[in-house]
Image (cartoon, grey):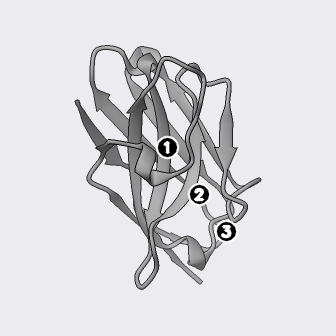
Amino acid sequence: VQLQASGGGSVQAGGSLRLSCAMAAPILSNYALAWFRLAPGKEREFVGTISRGGRVTSYANSVKGRFTISRDNAKNTGYLQMNRLKPEDTAVYYCAAKYTVTGHAPTRDSEYDIWGQGTLVTVSS
């Protein structure tokens, strides 16, 4: 199982980006998906998560109301829509997946065992 994150880039503060996470697996709907980010000099931070069926989502307080996580299981792809971006959102963003038979959407990175390669988001002021 592999994940491929894409969609990063450079944007001015207040702008938007949409990240994608494509999964090379037969049944994406068996996996909870999450986004984490790693900024220079900081520890990896939870951004958001969505359950296998998409009914449960959870966000970090720092992005709540600005970021939206979604998924299209038919396309084996998850998304992170980022609006009203701030310079402090600058980081490498990683998508992660966890096989699950429940509607649980974990928020801890230690619970995920499949990771994408990361995509860089740079927000300038």
Residue drawn 39% across the image and 37% down it: 97
What residue does disc 2 label? 16
Which of the 4 quarters of the picture holds residue 92? bottom left
Query: Split into 4 quadrants, where in the image is the N terminus?
Result: top left
Nearer the observer, disc 3 or disc 1?
A: 1
What's the distance in space between the residues labelled 3 and 1, CA to CA? 23 Å
In x, y percent, where is residue 75?
A: 40, 20
Q: Amino acid at mark 1?
A: Ala
Q: Secondary structure at mark 1?
A: strand
In x, y percent, where is residue 107?
A: 57, 48
**Residue 122 shown left or right of residue 102 in the figure:** left
Give neighbour class at mark 2: few <14, some 14-19, many 20+ (Cα, 10 Å): some
Give neighbour class at mark 1: few <14, some 14-19, many 20+ (Cα, 10 Å): many
Residue drawn 60% across the image and 23% down it: 103
In x, y percent, where is residue 6?
A: 34, 48
Q: In this view of the protein, which residue sits in the foreground, 93 or 107?
A: 107
What residue does disc 1 label? 34
Which of the 4 quarters of the picture holds residue 25? top left
What's the distance in space between the residues labelled 3 and 2, CA to CA? 7 Å
Mark 3 or mark 1, earlier in chain:
3
Residue drawn 45% across the image and 18% down it: 29
Q: Amino acid at mark 3?
A: Gly
**Residue 84 shown left or right of residue 79 in the figure:** right
Q: Secondary structure at mark 2?
A: loop
What residue does disc 3 label? 14
